[in-house]
């Protein structure tokens, strides 16, 4: 460190040393503790214009041969105030924190049917929340009165204690850090600044929401104590399962049972969708498990005019009981149909081939 260093450079250098040798970072290390003390005492000298001038003129002789120990200890909050100021209120020095605090966020769970989630719906929910007292405008003080400055901290919200060469700031126990004391509380809210109310709130659920979707209403939560701003209100949505549709993103999936003749000969089937029945053509020779795509019959994309698709899988349904005539016809068909019953790789093995 040069003798011509600026105050900013001096403070930066001290901060680095203090962070390096701070006792909390070096528990039980006597050497580090001594270096931290020396750095603090050195800063106490060099940060004081008069003491620094004496040191620049006379060097260590300015301390009467006693090193830096002849000077008063430094207030550590002067160095770290810009780092830790938020722990002690605004700026960390000389000012009490505001009594006003932000209110709590609130949450309400809302259960929807599958159809309500797809098309959107308007619901009403009841909410219990603290709201600002109208009599005192949330200040907690009786009309025409005002809070007084705390005598314990003189309005700073903090009291300081000297512990060795540390100066420690703590929240004032008399005013709980507010810096003010209400001697004439509002009779309506008893000084709290807010009252508990139950409200009915309209909730507009947009089309296309999913299970677990959260809807946020800013500033609709609880009002903060002592006139503080309100928190937010969250609606968490829970969607019931559909009778046969399954949803993945904005696409829907379902399976339709068909007979073997329908697949072999081809057919048309009526597929129910969220928007009414849809006629689906199944080509002849279609295989069991074939999946057909019906465009724009899925779930609306949230806050968009687009929709997902509907995928329909055809599954062969084998009759469990046959009439005599049905058996005769199937036996005749079997005699006319030749299929080599050779093993084939199943889906699991195909996946292994792809990713293995």
Image (cartoon, grey):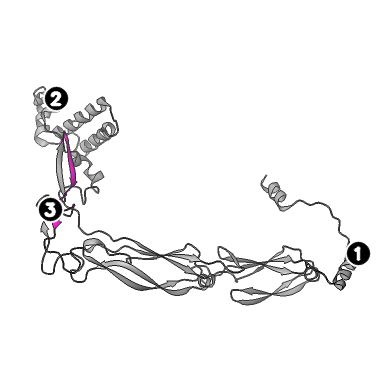
Q: In which quarter of the image is the C terminus?
A: top right
Residue in the picture at 14% in, 24% down:
67
Tell me which corner region of the image, top left, top right, bottom left or bottom right, holds residue 312: bottom right
Residue 309 drawn at (x, y percent)? 61, 68
As measured in the structure, the alpha-carbon distance from the residue carrying label 3 to the one carrying label 1 is 101 Å
Residue 307 drawn at (x, y percent)? 56, 70
Please, what secondary structure does the residue beneath circle 2 have? Answer: helix
Residue in the picture at 21% in, 40% down:
79
Residue 5 drawn at (x, y percent)? 20, 35
Query: Can residue 1 be seen at all in this image of the molecule?
Result: no
Q: According to the image, label 2 marks what residue?
A: 67
Q: According to the image, label 1 marks what residue?
A: 335
Mark closest to the chain's N terminus, 3 or 2: 2
Mark closest to the chain's N terminus, 1 or 2: 2
Q: Which of 255 and 328 is in front in this view?
A: 328
**Callout 2: 10 Å neighbours few (<14), some, many (20+)?**
some
Tell me which corner region of the image, top left, top right, bottom left or bottom right, holds residue 10: top left
Q: In which quarter of the image is the N terminus?
A: top left
Mark closest to the chain's N terminus, 3 or 1: 3
Residue 142 drawn at (x, y percent)? 13, 67
Discs 3, 2 touching: Cβ within 8 Å: no
As measured in the structure, the alpha-carbon distance from the residue carrying label 3 to the one carrying label 2 is 38 Å
Q: Give the range drawn in magenta.
A: 163-182
Please, what secondary structure does the residue beneath circle 3 have? Answer: loop
Instruction: Check residue 35 for magenta coloring.
Output: no
Q: According to the image, label 3 marks what residue?
A: 155
Q: Which of 318 and 31 is in front in this view?
A: 318
Foreground mark, 3 or 1, reads: 1
Horizontal side of 231 relative to 242 (left or right) equals left
Residue in the picture at 15% in, 43% down:
160
């Amino acid at each position: 460190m040069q003798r011509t260093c600026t105050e900013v450079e001096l403070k930066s250098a001290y901060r680095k040393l203090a962070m390096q040798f701070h006792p909390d970072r070096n528990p039980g290390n006597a050497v580090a503790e001594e270096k931290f003390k020396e750095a603090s005492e050195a800063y106490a000298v060099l940060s004081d214009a008069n003491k620094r001038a004496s040191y620049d003129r006379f060097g260590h002789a300015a301390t009467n041969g006693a090193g830096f120990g002849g000077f008063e200890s430094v207030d550590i909050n002067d160095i770290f105030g810009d780092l830790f100021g938020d722990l002690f209120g605004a700026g960390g020095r000389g000012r009490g924190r505001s009594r006003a605090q932000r209110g709590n966020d609130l949450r309400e769970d809302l259960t929807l049917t599958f159809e309500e989630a797809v098309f959107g719906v308007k619901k009403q929910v009841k909410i219990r929340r603290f709201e600002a007292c109208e009599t005192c405008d949330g200040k907690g003080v009786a009309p025409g009165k005002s809070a007084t400055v705390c005598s314990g901290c003189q309005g700073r919200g903090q009291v300081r204690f000297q512990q060795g060469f540390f100066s420690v700031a703590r929240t004032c126990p008399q005013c709980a850090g507010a810096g003010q004391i209400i001697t004439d509380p509002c009779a309506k809210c008893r000084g709290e600044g807010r009252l508990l109310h139950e409200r009915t709130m309209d909730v507009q659920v947009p089309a296309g929401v999913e299970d677990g979707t959260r809807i946020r209403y800013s500033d609709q939560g609880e009002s903060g104590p002592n006139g503080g701003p309100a928190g937010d209100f969250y609606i968490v949505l829970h969607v019931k399962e559909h009778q046969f549709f399954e949803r993945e993103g904005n696409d829907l999936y379902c399976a339709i049972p068909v007979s073997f003749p329908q697949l072999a000969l081809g057919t048309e089937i009526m597929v129910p969708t969220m928007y009414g029945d849809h006629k689906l053509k199944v080509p002849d020779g279609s295989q069991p498990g074939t999946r057909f795509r019906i465009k724009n019959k899925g779930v609306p994309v949230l806050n968009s005019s687009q929709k997902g698709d509907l995928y329909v899988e055809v599954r062969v349904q084998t009759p469990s009981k046959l009439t005599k005539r049905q058996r005769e016809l199937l036996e005749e068909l079997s005699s006319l149909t030749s299929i080599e019953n050779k093993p084939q790789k199943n889906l699991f093995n195909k996946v292994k081939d792809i990713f293995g």
